[in-house]
Image (spheres, rainbow, N blue to C red):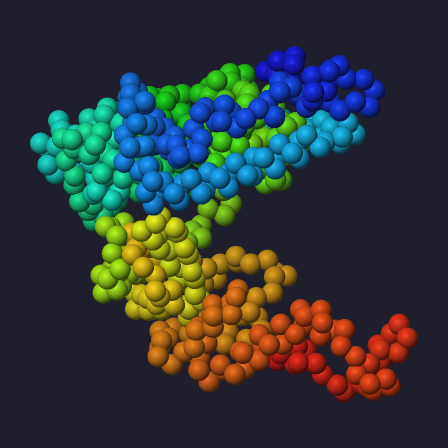
Amino acid sequence: LGGMSPEGPYEDAQMSRDGSQGGVGAPRQLGGMSPEDPYEDAQRSRDGFQGDTAFIPGFINHKAGMAGVDQERVKAVVKELTRGGQHHREESRKDANTEESIAKMKEMYASLSATRIREIEGSVRCRIGEMEAQRDLSRTWIHVDMDAFFAACHTLERPELASVPMAVGGMSMISTANYVARKAGVRSAMPGFVAVKLCPALVFVRQDFELYQKYAAMLREVWRVYDKEFDCGSLDEAYLDVTEFMSRTGMDGGEVAAKLRSDVETKTRLTCSAGVAPTRRLAKICSDWNKPNGQFVLERSREAVISFLSDLPVRKVGGIGKVLEGKLAAFQIRTCGQLRQSLNVIAAVFTPATIDFLFSVALGTGTEQRPPDAQRKGLGHERTFAPTSDPRFIEAKLHGLAEDVAKELQKENLKAQTVTLKIKKSNFEVMQRQLTVPSSNAAKVIAEAAILLLRKERPYGALRLVGVKASNFEGADLLKASQQTVDNMMPTADAKRSEQAFDVGSTYFCSEEGCGRNIPLNLKQSHDDYHLAMRLSRDPSWEKRKAPRGAVGTRIGKKARRDPSQKTILSMFVKNKT
């Protein structure tokens, strides 16, 4: 296939894993890797970020406007301020899990037989051929991304902030930073106390979501002109299929992007950056290419796509975070070009879903069309604050978040049937709990469910973040037709769809593992009996118990004889859906 070097995944490797010459039946190395790569210490393959500094790459990963930042200084500051702390311990625990996973992947790779290697190579050839045959270069996508949106909105209201380093957020966490602050290494998702150490003159501004939503509404008016069905990735970004707009106006992709950016600035006085490409994924990467207030156009040809991806760091691709980046680096894969040359390795050690994703990234295919299921699956908000165990403060936060979620549900005419609580403890441990509620978009229902879930976790200690999410929207087909749920077996389906808010005082919270339902008190006994029946049905010792020989329902020979009129506990509950 064009664009692949001769030593790509189709070349038969001549060396066995120990570096000796391979012969007939000898283990062969999968193409795209040097023989020693899978066995080298992970420290080198992860660029030296190991153990107590493994989480630092998240803070030095460059965002727009951070070119020239002294990475070594940022690493030193982060290490100094977090070493031995709760955040450090939690991140080190996560890193240890990643390293364990990498070790297992390498072990799996080392155990491949010559036969299995040939099977993988054949499958990869077929899969690449299929994906190339399906490559679609007929569409033109623009990804538009506002420049430091939250900070820019505040600067419009307070022009004096334009020339000073400024961040939105507080000492706990930063939402975004302006480009003056980014030159000092300050960025989004960075703790405020770290940012202040990097930039002592940093000015903090409190978040103002009403202000952001005001400008976001203005942006949507502009985007709708170019694509009525545009998809919003967040308040400050959108994907637009401008193929039809180009056909109507005779403009090319670059001209459309320039006009769109001009219209946004005229309407809002805010600047944005745009990426133009034949797929949504590539357009998003391109929008970050010439930030701020710039654009980049990727030609609609296979050669242009392959060339663009060759030296692109894998971390630039949406969906590849620190963990997946580390796993790829363990196999000496740091760019999309290296990824394309190592697809046999990918097929050998990753899960099927990750394999499909990484293949499409390597070849630059996929995401050419608008997702058929682009409707919302969930809607939520969360807030970070200084660690506290004050239940009044925390529950007040949950009430406020529930109000925000309810307003958005009502605006979009959605009713949720599941409420999820997210909490982050002072030691940075994250927990999520969810509860099924009557279909509703009322703030009272959402707040009561979130608070009920919170109280079930007492004593929860000091918290630094809480979040509330509503999901499982009424009418959404989120479950497979064959999937069984507790709801299918309970007599509360009608109550679940009731418009009335449930009364927490008249309900029973089931703490059975995997359940977590809120059950009316008058159905508590039936619900408990259901779980008892399920436990008995799963208990192997129960099935092995024998009644006296000859009794009805006992085994005679190899077959069981049972009285047809006899009913088991489980069958009664399944039949009656209780």
Q: Name the residue located 72 percent from the left edge and 83 percent from the top edge.
A: 567
* Residue sitting nearer the eye, 256 or 554: 554
The residue most toward the front is: 84
* Residue sitting nearer the eye, 13 or 406: 13
Residue 64 place in picture, x, y as percent: 31, 26
- With respect to residue 315, does 471 lie above or below? below
The residue most toward the top is: 6
The residue most toward the left is: 160
Q: Name the residue located 38 percent from the left edge and 73 percent from the top edge.
A: 499
Res. 537 image quadrant = bottom right
Q: Quadrant of the N terminus?
A: top right
- With respect to residue 228, does 61 lie above or below? above
Residue 24 place in picture, x, y as percent: 83, 20
Residue 292 place in picture, x, y as percent: 28, 25
Residue 107 place in picture, x, y as percent: 65, 34
* Whether residue 421 is visible: yes
Q: Name the residue located 35 percent from the left edge and 52 percent from the top edge.
A: 424
Res. 235 image quadrant = top left
Q: Quadrant of the C terminus?
A: bottom right
